Image: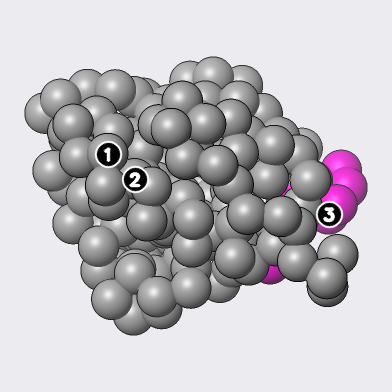
Amino acid sequence: DNSYGDCVGGEQVGRLQGQPDLRSRGHDHRARTRWIADDPGSAANPGDVEGWQMLGRTYLVSGNAVKATAAYQKAIDLTGGNDPALKLDLAEALILTEDPAVQDQAKQIVDAAIAADASNGKALWYSGVLAIRAGDKDTAKARWSQVLEQNPPDDIRQIIVAQLAELGVEAPAMGSGT
């Protein structure tokens, strides 16, 4: 999965390549999210993994990373923990909580995602974020440079170029494939 997530460095940047557009599923998405959000315990279908995932995304893009974490954890529990993309969604929410107590868990998930797919843009981005928080500028530079090599969408590229500039790194010119 080369998606970069809906939130990059806490900024809403929209759905990016490779990530399911949960919003495109119309009223079904809204209805399912509403019943879970209103009362998850008495929901008509509390075993709806996709519903919990949509709720997590909804919470995340609306700025409630703590509730997103709970929704993603519920979805992971329902899948038996066998969905790497869902785990990465959880890691994103954990990172965005900025709660020091959960950052190690987030790092383990991100590291596992990179070990499974060294070109996972979302994992590379958040690995850089975690590296900056830990004072490891070299890792952040390397991870974010790897994302740039994938020629991400312009809005993501601009954010990464700005982050690299703050670290004293001049971003490479855009590839010929864009």
Where residue 87 sits in the image (x, y, percent)? Answer: 36, 59
Q: Residue at x 29, y 22 (%)?
A: 98
Residue, far bottom: 116
Is the C-beta separation of discs 2 and 1 under 8 Å?
A: yes
Residues 97 and 57: in front is 97
Name the residue carrying label 3.
Answer: 25
Seen in the picture, residue 48 relative to 141 is either above or below; the reply is below
Quadrant assignment for the C terminus: bottom right
* Magenta span: 14-27
Seen in the picture, residue 5 relative to 42 is either above or below; the reply is below
Residue mark closest to the camera, 1 vs 3: 1
Which numbered marker is on residue 37? none
Could you say whether the residue bearing mark 2 is in a helix, strand or loop?
helix
Q: Is residue 26 magenta?
A: yes
Which numbered marker is on residue 140? 2
Q: Tell me the distance, in whole angstroms, between the alpha carbons under discs 3 and 2.
A: 35 Å
Residues 43 and 81: in front is 81
Q: Residue at x 20, y 40 (%)?
A: 136
Quarter-of-image position of residue 25: bottom right
